[in-house]
Image (cartoon, rainbow, N blue to C red):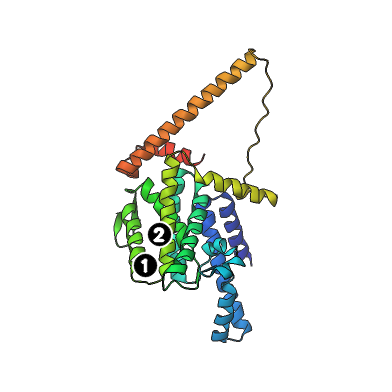
Amino acid sequence: MAVFGSIWDDIRHSFRMGNMVTRLVIINFAVFALVKITYFVMWLVLQGDRAQTMALFDEGLYWLCMPSEWKTLLFRLWTPFTSMFLHEGLGHFLGNLIALYLFGGIVGDLLGDRRVLPLYLLGGLVGNALFFISAQFLPYVGTYALGASGAIMALAGATLILAPDYRVMLLLLGEVKVKYIVLVLVLLDLVGIANQSNTGGHAAHIGGFALGCLFVYRLRDGVDMAEYVNNILDRVFGIFGGNRGGRKKPKRKPQMAAQRGGLASRQAKGQASSDSAYEQSFQEKLDTILDKIKEHGYDQLTPEEKEFLFHASKK
């Protein structure tokens, strides 16, 4: 029991102190483990009757999957969210976890940790929307969808736009640029749609990918889609008296009132002007680095630029 207690403490510590990618990995792993344990318990209760176990298990699992029929979706409005954390097959689960760690880490480093979860959620929702729409018009879609693939393809799309020449080490292949990995994934989805094989799933992947690309382009235009999602999440967690990640927001110190034309007023204006200039200089330097990554790749950054980007991702 001491061993399991130690493992539980390690997981709790990693979730509390880790970045958002670590937390998403832990959540997906916990849901996958719970699904498998549930199946095993049902198998024991039904005395090893595999057919009956599978029938009851699938019936329960459908309550968390994204349905393709609008009548079912109308009474299971939570499924667009729950399905993006749900995996059943081991290969599907491991593949998504590796991709989440890869693309999520790059997005977190380049755009900041606070944008990882919003991008994951938006990608998953758009992916589920494309699955639902495709089910109304295309054949061979299936009755339900599950998995984080749409959400992860959003991270992949963002990575493609941000750092196409970023190199990662792949088993048996060596160093490969991210752009080739992402484009192969997109190509496989397009081929899958053309071959009418798991059409809805591949459509969901394309939807997530498109959302990830749009996310970065809108951010460059000054529109941060993550802010809208973070505001909603903060309100939801605020209702339950909690905060995301266990981190409290720093309280702003109340500013002292100053008479018009007084020394305190001039100092406040000078400080505000200094802060504004600093923020403008910081953003300009960040934009320059991101443009350099787009043109030449992450590896071409100087150590000083990499360090600046690391600290910028923590803001």
Q: Residues within 10 Å of mark 1 (few under 14, many from 20)?
A: many
Residue 206 is labelled as 2
Residue 248, percent from left and from top: 64, 43
Q: Residue at x 42, y 61 (%)?
A: 205
Residue 76 is labelled as none
Residue 15, percent from left and from top: 57, 54
Judging by the rendered image, the residue that carries numbered circle 1 is: 193
Determine whether the residue tagged by mark 2 lies in a helix, strand or loop.
helix
Q: Nearer the viewer, residue 201 or 293?
A: 201
Determine whether the residue tagged by mark 1 lies in a helix, strand or loop.
helix
Residue 156 occupies which quadrant of the picture? Answer: bottom left
The relative height of residue 256 versus residue 91 in the rendered view (above or below) is: above
Q: Residue at x 44, y 54 (%)?
A: 154
The relative height of residue 29 versus residue 105 in the rendered view (above or below) is: below
Q: Residue at x 63, y 12 (%)?
A: 261
Q: Nearer the viewer, residue 238 or 177?
A: 238
Q: Is residue 155 visible?
A: no
- Circle nearer the N terminus (1, 2): 1
Q: Quadrant of the N terminus?
A: bottom right
Q: Is residue 132 visible?
A: yes
Q: CA distance from mark 1 to mark 2?
A: 10 Å
Circle 1/circle 2 CB separation < 8 Å = yes
